[in-house]
Image (cartoon, rainbow, N blue to C red):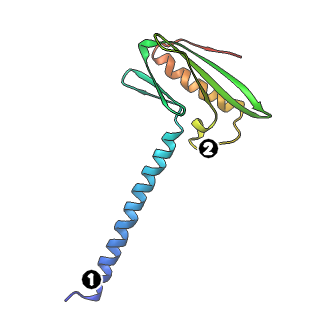
Amino acid sequence: MISTKEIITLIILFILGIVILVTFFARKLRDIKREHYDLWRTEKNSLIFYDDTAHTFPFDQIIGITFSRRRKMLGIWEGTLIVHAKDQESTAIIFDGSSYFKRKVTVTPKRTIDYIIDELIDELRKHGISYEILK
């Protein structure tokens, strides 16, 4: 016969297992949500940009990237990057501070847009891709 002490131990272990599983899946879900806001990623000699869909450009096909930023409203800014690639139409991608903060934001200051552009420029320099920043 199982004693009361053993039953309590089993219940505690069961609850502990559930807590560990919930924590694991909550972290995975948080990471998936954070990836949702990624503006770009590098994989296998390609630069992938995300807006509503993924746009993949092999590094050797990218001619250059043009950046610009504009004020949407008082204090709210958005950035635009245009990818110029060989044998493909130029692709314009609009972004805001959500890609920096990894969550939905409604107000993006100019310095955040500048920081996002600087991060991407650092990545472009690593791969020898030319860029231009429009004022």
Figure quadrant of residue 79: top right
- Against 64, residue 21 (above or below) is below
How far across and down, in percent of the image, does residue 64 sit? Answer: 53, 12
User: Closer to the camera, 126 or 28?
Assistant: 28
How far across and down, in percent of the image, does residue 5 sit? Answer: 29, 85
Tell me the quadrant of the picture where the N terminus can be found.
bottom left
Residue placed furthest toward the left: 1
User: Closer to the camera, 13 or 30?
Assistant: 30
Measuring 72% from the left and 25% from the top, which residue is drawn there?
A: 70
Which three-letter amino acid code belongs to the residue tagged 2? Lys
Q: Which residue is mark 1?
A: 6
Q: Which residue is mark 2?
A: 104
* Left or right of residue 93, residue 12 in this image: left
Measuring 50% from the left and 16% from the top, which residue is drawn there?
A: 125
Figure quadrant of residue 107: top right
SS at mark 2 in the image: loop
Residue 87 marker: none
From mark 1 to mark 2, how far is it between C-alphas?
48 Å
SS at mark 1 in the image: helix
